[in-house]
Amino acid sequence: PDPTEEEVRYWLAGNLCRCTGYTKIFDAVQAAVGLPGRLGAGVAPPPATPHYFRPRSLEEALEVLIQRGGEVRPVAGGTDLLVKAKDGLLDRGALFDVSLVPELQGIEEGNASLRIGAASTHAQLAASPLVARYVPALAQACALIGGPQIRNQGTLGGNLANGSPAADTVPPLYVADAVVELVSVSARREVPIAEFFTGPRQTVLTGDELIVAVRVPKRPGVRAAFLRLGQRQAQAISKVSVAVAMTFHDGRPDWVRVALGAVAPTVIRAREAEKALLTGGAEALRLARDLVQAEVRPISDLRSTSAYRRAMAGVLLERAVRKLAES
């Protein structure tokens, strides 16, 4: 009923926590016994009961944004935001749920493009025959994100709005020449994916806009691959990721796109490497590998060094191109 910090640590010995460490466990015991300040940094007080908005139309969702000004933030899966809320870094009352808005749902094939609703989940994208046909690198990336629970909950629009340079869905959209559809009460605009991100965790999205969909041009015969390197094969943030898309004519590439994640402030296109790959052959691949290492701008952080990221950008590019050549 009245444990000391030493007693809590003693009785929790042997419990292994791979992801979050012991601090949160100690804080949970602290909260349970009602002794704030005894066992660590303390636990954030529970938020006040929030107003709960769950619009069922695009018009209603945009009206919430207008009426609430900068007070609220849209959320669909919430797999990133709710972690911050749990840690007391985000007011849960500032979120409203757009997961039921019909205009944000569905994967639809048009005459010239594939339209993917922003609330489409990673699991839906990974399982979609249309995505596998026209945006194969995206299907591959979505199959690797998190675990089944995260893939069933997290959405494409949320991954874009989060603005992480390590987001796994973004390099596949770069190599697909994707366009992001944004809507506000007064306007609708389309932004090329390469212009959507302005920096780490920063986008062109304004406070009164929603991401409603991503549109991808249909490119017959496209082959694409997505490869990533993380601390583990599953449930890990990418240290470096590479997406490559190509079409071929008479066995030689006639259209090439290369994009990399987690190696610059935003996902980047490797345009010089693309030009090299268009010439075809083993020498072109060696040149592209060297060029891509010169094009990336990685940093060193807790997950990796810049030198390692630079080297692996070339390695993953070569593996991806060889994978496409064999497909």
Image: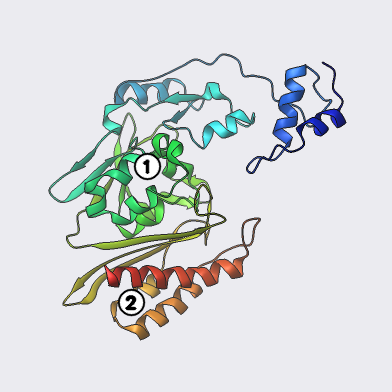
For this orientation, the residue located farthest to the left is: 111
Q: Which of the 4 image quadrants contains residue 274? A: bottom left
The answer, for residue 61, to whether it is visible in the render is yes
Camera-near label (2 vs 1) is 1
Q: Is residue 254 left or right of residue 275?
A: left
Q: Is residue 5 left or right of residue 82?
A: right
Classed neighbour count for the residue bearing mark 2: other residues with Cα under 10 Å, few (<14), some (14–19), many (≥20): many
For this orientation, the residue located farthest to the front is: 14
Q: Nearer the viewer, residue 29 or 105?
A: 29
Residue assigned mark 2: 277
Q: Nearer the viewer, residue 127 or 114?
A: 127
All told, the count of numbered labels is 2
Classed neighbour count for the residue bearing mark 1: other residues with Cα under 10 Å, few (<14), some (14–19), many (≥20): many
Q: Nearer the viewer, residue 79 or 206?
A: 79
User: Callout 1: helix, strand or loop?
Assistant: helix
The circle on residue 122 is 1
Residue 97 x, y percent position in the rendering: 42, 25
Residue at horizontal 21%, vertical 71%? 248
Please identify the quadrant where the C terminus is shown: bottom left
Residue 86 vertical placement versus 290 (above, below): above
Residue 267 x, y percent position in the rendering: 45, 57
Which amino acid, mark 2? Answer: Leu
The answer, for residue 190, to whether it is visible in the render is no
Which amino acid, mark 1? Answer: His
Residue 280 x, y percent position in the rendering: 29, 81
Residue at horizontal 62%, vertical 61%? 304
Q: Nearer the viewer, residue 132 or 295?
A: 132
